[in-house]
Amino acid sequence: MTRPVINRRAFVTLAGAGTAVAFGIPAYLPRIGEAADAIQIGVLEPYTGVYAAQAENETHGFEMAVEMWNKRGGAMGRKIQLVKEDEQNDPGVAAQKARKLINQDKVAALMGTVSSGVSLSVSGVSFTSGTLFMDSGGHSDDVTGKSCHWNVFRTCHSTWMETHATGYTLAKHFGKKWFLITPDYAYGHSLETGFKDVLARIGGEIVGNELTPLGTTDFSSYLTKIDAAKPTCVLVLVQGDDYTNCLKQMNQFGLLKKYPVGGPQVELEALYGLPPEARQGYWGIEYYYKSDLTLGKGNAAAHQFVTDTIKRYGKPPTARNCFAYVTADRLITAMAEAKSVDPVKVAHAIENVRFSSIYNGAGGTYYRKEDHQLMWPMWVAKIRPDGTPGDKYDLFDVTDIQAAEAIEQTVAEKEKVCKLGYP
Amino acid sequence: MLHDLVPQLFNGLVLGAFYAIVAIGLSLIMNLTGTINMAHGSFMTLAGYLAYSLVLRGTSFWFALIAAPLICVIVGVLVERTLVRPLYKREPFYSLLMTFGLSLMAEEIFRLIWGSNGVPFSPPAALAGATSLGFMAFPTFRIFIVAVLVVAIVALAFFLTRTRFGLRLRAAVQDTEMIAALGTNTQVLYAVNFGLGIFLAGIAGVLAAGMLGLSPTSGNALLMPAFVTVIIGGMGSLFGSIVGGLLIGTAISMTTLFIPAASEVSMYVLMAIVLSVRPRGLFGEEGIFG
Amino acid sequence: MRARRELAVFILAVVLLACGPLISPLVHLDISILSEVLVTTLAVLSVNLLLGYTGLPAFGNAAYFGLGAYGAALSVTYLHVDFVTAVLAGAAAAVAGALILGPFLLRRRGIYFGLLSIAFGEIFYFIAYRYTDVTGGEDGMNFPRPPFGPGLAHVAIHETQFYYIALVVFAVAMIAFRVVVRSPFGRTLIAIRQNEARVRYLGLDTDRFIFVALLISALLAGVSGALFGLLINFAYPLELDWHQSGNFVLMMILGGAGTIWGSLIGALIYVIGKDIISTITPLWQIFLGALFVACVLGFPRGIVGSLGALRRRRPVDPEDPVSSEAFDAGAPVEVGRGV
């Protein structure tokens, strides 16, 4: 292949036609299957990248909620329609896609995101344009903390809630001398701060804290230090692929047999990638499909949600399905209540309204008015390494439940950093 | 801290052995044709996934350890003949870009076939668990990796020095024109050389899947250390890749001991230093890339 | 004659681009993505200068891009500067980076230069990622878009105004770029690409020329990064990663290395194409990868380059298919025929 043969005429024609088609496509895209009077809600999820599995599950949750509403005739007599965009786990792309959804697709609100960086970026863009943004899956404290806005609500638990829910439980079961394996970036640092706060309150000690930099695939150098520190338990704070690597390696070094292990959070998606012998420990979970403690005894809606998800998608819902479902459901409820899609009215309609949902929320859960964080319980579960015969997804024994108010910062503390700034 | 030193050192050397396997494959491909294979990590991930699928269907780990890399070789040679060959005449950075594009495609394809979740893959029971080494308990699987490296090096050395083909390969690295003039089919040479590099990538991939996790993005994380190894050890020198690998592994584990925050970036710093001071690396040959 | 034709093309392009806000709703694109195209073009220009014209594999320009973004972000967040100052701060950060890295980079050529660039880029990436307190770490930095200038505090910059600011910067950059590459300095760069040893024999200190090219390139990339940060009101570490550098290189190749307009065309196709394809399918990465592969294999001159080659009816040299004005053998030294 020494010389590309380009017929000049063909080239110019092709280029011209290609450009015309390419630029023409977007003009037609949204018209496909669009109902004239529907309420459009934008969905931003990382369909490509490391969180693709979470993105998929969140989308399923959104879809189920929207379907349920549309069966009832929609909100204010209008059907709901989701417009999905791939934010690619990239804050820059997310900002552009958010703008596209807001300005071109004219969505009434935005929902979604998994990574904190993306959540923060979208939060900023949506604030500038005055559009509602429901952060279903981004955990950073800042979203309802120093970067909070009147138009931003957050469903999943904050990082602070994660550390406090698990911290109290782990101290109860395994003593107060902890060895931390912390990812050396923003999320890890917040986790570290949270756990330190817990220990300060109950009088414990961090005997070792290994900060593992970005890109660490091999944890052996950190694991060899555990024995010398003599902890009562080891906390693994790393997430995603790193979590899998770390636990696998801990197992290979025989550490899982020696020390109890736990952590602020585990996503089922990550757990599935772990071989059975490495599945150990007590972990914070934000939802579980098969426990009275998480679903609530006799909670028909919760059980229905699980059954429906299994029927439709062939696998039980993870926390991600739950976040998304609750997010969409509450958003549309607020629109129906406010009889409007005006962001300010809807925002006020979401705040402080108590509701019960597809999880165990005795007493009613609510999006707190001061910072727009959903106040709902968090749970701690022990992994069942061999799973359950007959259900390969059933890996947890849920052991503890922690009430939201006990594990999240108080209103007074939050008000110091969060100024909603209603227009 | 001193008694932390020995386990860390050992750890580092073993890690280095792993990087060395990857680096040798990369180096082989680079030496002969100047092809910079940014898709090397993708081939590693492919081998891991293939091994996972094979074991899922009931084959043994050992069978998968050989079969998966062999399948990768077939894919690799196909890639070489169709996509890499046209770039031989051009500067190396074209192959870098092309293989980079390939790695982007590969990641998405893996996601399509095996899902975006990580998949569980473990070493067989015989290699699981830890062996007591006196000063520490060490994962048996990692010791196995060192063993594989030793076997690979011996086999490669034998191939390159004792077989006819290996001789021709070495000659071609020195002077391709001459050996073509002497009647050797250089196209076959290129293909086999590429295949050999991919085979090593495949073995490394299966080993990595057992030691670390396996997900569509696994390969990327392992690619950069391998490149750094080749550069530090020296382009054009397989021995350099081994030494480079051990150096990197040790550097990372030692920095972890003293300045943990810098451990992952330490290899880039090393790379920058080597490139500034002695770009051909420790054992590299002058003139490979000018 | 040629200069007049070039001027006409330039004016036509600027006028067309000035109609952006009118055209964009028709093709269902947000005006901010057109801003992104213009801003990204500057980064592609920076790569083009080093790689297309001087022949140095510039795989680390994302470092300057990122420095620009963070320079703007930090100056707005901590020093509360206005828009113009933020851009200048970003540019200064990028140039400072080049001043520091330059002496190291200068010592090598060819692929070593490229790998060294990648290494430095990665080091900056790790720094941005690690120092959460300053840079926000992996979460990135949100920062507001400041008003345009001192005394204009009431003038907020919305998307349309931003677009026109970007257009002005783009136009200035293009003019400056053309001036540079057509000047004796630029010609020397091209000559360095063809045969550096020969240039040295002629008594010129190639290191100095390359260093200046590096600074200009960093300046362009820094302005680009600062503007991009101000566009999305965000700065994040991924902007420094070598994948980002790779994207700039792809855009340059798509459009045409060694051509003046190639940078814009490449940025246009990549940014808008990626936006459209990613809306249609989550498999956009396969298309992107395939585009890389296809471009490198069959289309190394890029669009503008191929058009130019077609007009001149010259065969593509397999060993160095990059097009560049004074590159064609046999073309008169003074008048290399550009697009």
Image (cartoon, helix red, strand yellow):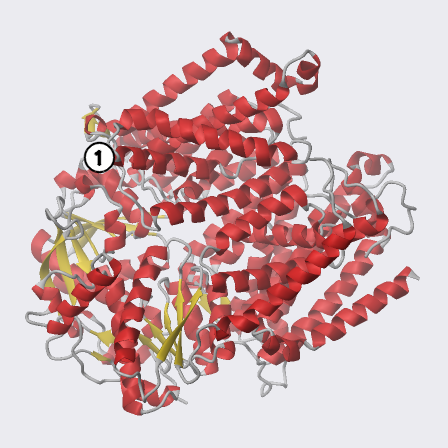
Relative placement, left or right, of C256 versus A36 is right
Q: Residue at x 26, y 38 (%)?
A: A249
The percent coordinates of residue C325 (x first, y second) are 82, 50
Q: Quadrant of residue B137?
A: top left
Q: Which one is nearer the viewer's eye here, A303 or B239?
A: A303
| Subunit bearing disc 1 | A
Q: Which one is nearer the viewer's eye here, A309 or B154?
A: A309
The image quadrant where one finds the C terminus of chain C is: bottom right
The percent coordinates of residue A66 (x first, y second) are 30, 75
Relative placement, left or right, of C93 versus A91 is right
Q: Is residue C103 visible?
A: yes
Q: Is residue B16 visible?
A: no
Hey, what amino acid is under mark 1?
Answer: Phe
The percent coordinates of residue A385 (x first, y second) are 14, 45
Relative placement, left or right, of C224 versus B227 is right
Q: Residue furthest left?
A: A297
Q: Residue at x 25, y 73 (%)?
A: A326
Q: Residue at x 42, y 80 (%)?
A: A35
Around disc 1, counting alpha carbons within 10 Å, would you say few (fewer than 14), some (14 to 19), or many (20 or more)?
A: many
Q: Residue at x 54, y 12 (%)?
A: B165
Judged from the image, the secondary structure of the residue bearing numbered disc 1 is loop
Q: In the image, is residue A347 above or below residue C45?
A: below
Q: Which one is nearer the viewer's eye here, B206 or C79?
A: B206
The percent coordinates of residue A320 (x first, y second) are 27, 63
Q: Which residue is mark 1?
A: A253
**Tally of marks:** 1
Q: Quadrant of residue C104?
A: top right
Relative placement, left or right, of C198 versus C277 is right
